[in-house]
Image: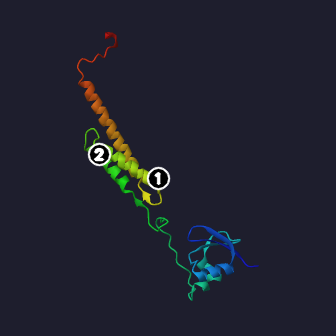
Amino acid sequence: MSAIYKIIGDDGREYGPVTAEQIRAWIAEGRIERRTPVFVEGAKDWNFVGLLPEFISGFGTTSKPPTIAPPSRSPTAAGQMAKTNAYAQAGMIFGILSVTCCCCGFPFGILGLIFSLVGLSQINANPQWHEGRGMAIAGLILSGLSLLLGAGSILLKLLANQPHVMWNIGQF
């Protein structure tokens, strides 16, 4: 009785169980390459088709197994690496500026909030393409803190400039 196999296609889906003859036909059609993951019934773990002796001849005259280096970071579906989100970066920069440069948190605090929220939204929608969640959160915190301090400062100035405010409740 011949072995039964399962493979994981380029689309990420599992195919099988299939026979060795079907695997050879897929190799000949170019639907399977050396690095296609394969599971042999009864094995402990997945392997690569190009490492199995019964399929090496289907990949040409060389019997050298493929060299497979693990990626340093996981690529996205389109083969691109995740990049730091520009909105998250801008949100953090504006958050820092709002705390250090401006009184009242305007206009950098508002810009920091907007950019940080947009960045977080994009990161949450496509985490495989965007990094920078910490930057966006830092931008939100700094911008929010700056705006709160600015609003509190304005409120205190308004209250301090009120003439003859009756603070004593018994004087009505």
Residue 129 lies, with reference to residue 24, above or below; the image says: above
Rendered residue at 60%/81% (across/down): 27
The local crowd at label 1, few if under 14, some if 14 to 19, many if 20 or more residues have their Cα within 10 Å, is: some
Residue 172 lies, with reference to residue 73, above or below; the image says: above
Rendered residue at 25%/39% (across/down): 103
| Residue highlighted by disc 1 | 124
> Which residue ends up furthest to the top in the rendered image?
171
Amino acid of disc 1: Asn
> Which residue ends up furthest to the front in the rendered image?
29
> Which residue ends up furthest to the bottom in the rendered image?
61
Whole-percent x, y for residue 98 in the image = 29, 44
The local crowd at label 2, few if under 14, some if 14 to 19, many if 20 or more residues have their Cα within 10 Å, is: many
Rendered residue at 31%/48% (across/down): 94
The quadrant of the picture occupied by the C terminus is top left
Residue 50 - label: none
| Residue highlighted by disc 2 | 108
The answer to whether residue 95 is visible is no
Whole-percent x, y for residue 60 in the image = 57, 87
Mark 2 and mark 1: Cα distance apart in space? 24 Å
